[in-house]
Amino acid sequence: MEDLDLDQELIRAALPQAVLAVLSHGESHGYALAEILRQHGFARIKGGTLYPLLKRLEDHGFVEHTWQHDLAGPGRKRFTITEQGLDELARTSAAWHRMSQTLTKIRTIRQEQP
């Protein structure tokens, strides 16, 4: 998919919802999560952005992690979405949809002049 050429503030606003959406399909470690986001247009997401976000989502109870230990290398965190995270994803998805509808109306409805 083509990289999103969006304002950083818009990406920052969308990223928590995108992370929760990816995790709603199954657990993931950070690198794989970043790769999925990249495949869907979030090309500029780096570890310095993603891991603090995952920590904030965990602090709010939206995700949790377990350690996966591997004999071939260091352990890594595997993140899963919680029930509270699924509720938050539904809430933010609905809010994003309402905002999109509002912006579409503002752009397309002829405004009466005062």
Image: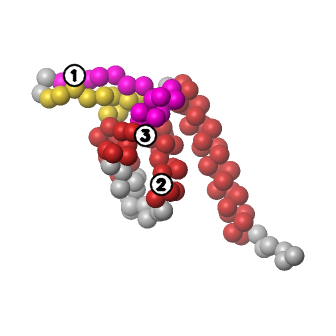
Q: Count the marks: how many?
A: 3
- In reply to whether residue 76 is colored magenta, the answer given is no
Does the image show residue 77? yes
- At 51% across and 49% down in the image, what residue appears? 14
Q: What separation in Å lies between label 1 and label 3 (alpha carbons)?
A: 23 Å
Which one is nearer the viewer's eye here, 71 or 51? 51
Q: Residues within 10 Å of mark 3 (few under 14, many from 20)?
A: some
Whole-percent x, y for residue 59 in the image: 47, 28
Residue extending farthest to the bottom is 113
- In reply to whether residue 64 is colored magenta, the answer given is yes
- At 39% across and 39% down in the image, what residue appears? 52
Q: Quadrant of residue 68?
A: top left
- When the figure is inspected, residue 65 is found, relative to residue 20, above or below; the finding is above
Region in magenta: 54-70
Residue extending farthest to the left is 72
Label disc, if present, on residue 53 of the rendered structure: 3
Q: What separation in Å lies between label 2 and label 3 (alpha carbons)?
A: 13 Å
Specify whether 87 is left or right of 31: right
Q: Identity of the amino acid at label 1?
A: His
Whole-percent x, y for residue 32 in the image: 31, 40
Q: Earlier in the sequence, mark 2 or mark 3?
A: 2
Whole-percent x, y for residue 91 in the image: 63, 38
- Front disc: 1 or 3: 3
Q: Give the residue at mark 2.
A: 11
Q: Quadrant of residue 78?
A: top left
- At 71% across and 70% down in the image, what residue appears? 108
Q: Identity of the amino acid at label 3?
A: Leu
Q: Earlier in the sequence, mark 1 or mark 2?
A: 2
Q: Identity of the amino acid at label 2?
A: Ile
Q: Residues within 10 Å of mark 2 (few under 14, many from 20)?
A: some
